[in-house]
Amino acid sequence: MFYQDSQHVYRARPLTEFPWLEHGFGTRYTSAEVLAGDSTLATVHQIHSDICVAARGRAGLLGDGDALLENAPGHRVAVKTADCIPILLVDAQRRAVAAVHAGWRGTVQRIVEQAVRRMQEEFGTEPADLHAAIGPGIGKCCYEVGAEVSAQFGESGVCHIDLAEANGRQLAEAGVFEPRIYTARLCTRCNGDFHSYRRDRQQAGRMLSFIGIK
């Protein structure tokens, strides 16, 4: 369902069916020219929150937050990750999009549900019209957490947490049809194509996941 193109960008195949949409999940090998440095891209200073920012045709760094919403043609929104989960949302009816950054704190705060609600407020989005692509992030195989974090997920003691599954479940609870939730299942720590903070610590770079309207 996900594939890597010649520019070292992962795409969710179901999203490529919309000719008006552009999207991608970058890798450590994706060239900067593909992802950044133009006047159409908006980002935020990510703070592991549930704050969603409406870009409204603006570009550049738009303040603190962990999700960006857009419906202006010719503009893109993006989040940066290196183990956290990037999620791209598409309202196929109203041609509106969102990019979400969900680490464990954002997942506990249900950032992806908040993004769905904000799309309803900003664009009149119906959750049943949404498509969601959950991109590469640390997998359950590699995400061992201590008791303090596991308790936030209703677990006890040291255990492994599946952040992608948790966010997929939250999307379904927000009203997104499960067949329209597409999950890459690509672990950033296992796979050397990706930056991973767990693996590389301070030497880890960041990947950019982006979405926009042509």
Image: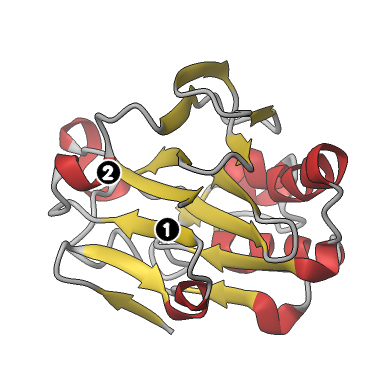
- Kindly give the residue lying farthest to the top in the view shown: 63
Question: In the rendered image of this protein, does residue 90 appear above or below residue 211?
Answer: below
Q: Which tag, 1 or 2, sits closer to the chain's start? A: 1
For the image, the number of numbered tags is: 2
Give the residue type at disc 1: His
Please provide percent x and percent y for residue 162: 56, 65
Residue 160 shows in the view = no
Asked if residue 28 lies left or right of residue 176, the reply is left
Q: Nearer the viewer, residue 141 or 110?
A: 110
Asked if residue 124 lies left or right of residue 93, the reply is right
> From mark 1 to mark 2, how far is it between C-alphas?
10 Å
Please provide percent x and percent y for residue 213: 51, 51
Would you name the residue on which mark 1 appears? 23
Asked if residue 124 lies left or right of residue 105, the reply is right
Would you name the residue on which mark 2 appears? 35
Q: Nearer the viewer, residue 46 or 121?
A: 121
